Image (tube, rainbow, N blue to C red):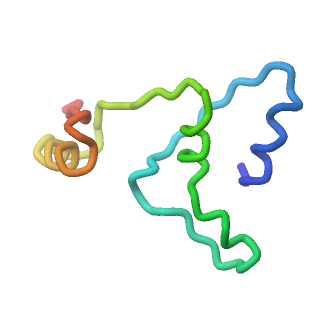
């Protein structure tokens, strides 16, 4: 979904959507000068609104030792290994 499409949400009577991402990973990047103000990720923008936010805390893709390190360094100890 493009950034510009988020503004159309208020026109729907009822809508449910899931936005999955991690604002602590790579920052947004664009090479178009006219869009340079759009350097905040959609996840961060939506987290600033009164929306229901759910945090996934179980990691299944990393070795447990890697998950522990990443959890401590970047996520305040919230992540746990699912392995």
Q: Residue 46 in the image: x percent, y percent? A: 60, 40
Q: Residue 35 in the image: x percent, y percent? A: 72, 70
- Tag count: 0
Q: Residue 53 in the image: x percent, y percent? A: 51, 28
Pick the front one: 69 or 45: 45
Q: Residue at x 25, y 33 (%)?
A: 78
Hey, which residue is sitting farthest left in the picture? 65
Image quarter hosting the C terminus: top left
Q: Is residue 73 left or right of residue 2?
A: left
Q: Is residue 52 above or below residue 78?
A: above
Quarter of image, res 64: top left
Q: Residue 56 in the image: x percent, y percent? A: 38, 31
Pick the front one: 61 or 53: 53
Q: Residue at x 14, y 49 (%)?
A: 69
Q: Is residue 23 above or below residue 30?
A: above
Quarter of image, res 75: top left
Q: Is residue 47 above or below residue 73?
A: above
Q: Is residue 25 left or right of residue 27?
A: left
């Amino acid at each position: 979904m493009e950034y510009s499409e988020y503004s159309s949400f208020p026109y729907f009577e009822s809508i449910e959507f899931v936005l999955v991402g991690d604002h602590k990973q790579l920052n947004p990047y664009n090479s178009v000068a006219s869009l340079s103000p759009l350097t905040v990720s959609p996840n961060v923008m939506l987290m600033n609104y009164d929306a229901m936010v759910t945090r996934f805390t179980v990691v299944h893709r990393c070795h447990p030792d890697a998950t522990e390190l990443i959890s401590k360094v970047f996520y305040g100890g919230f992540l746990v290994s699912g392995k």
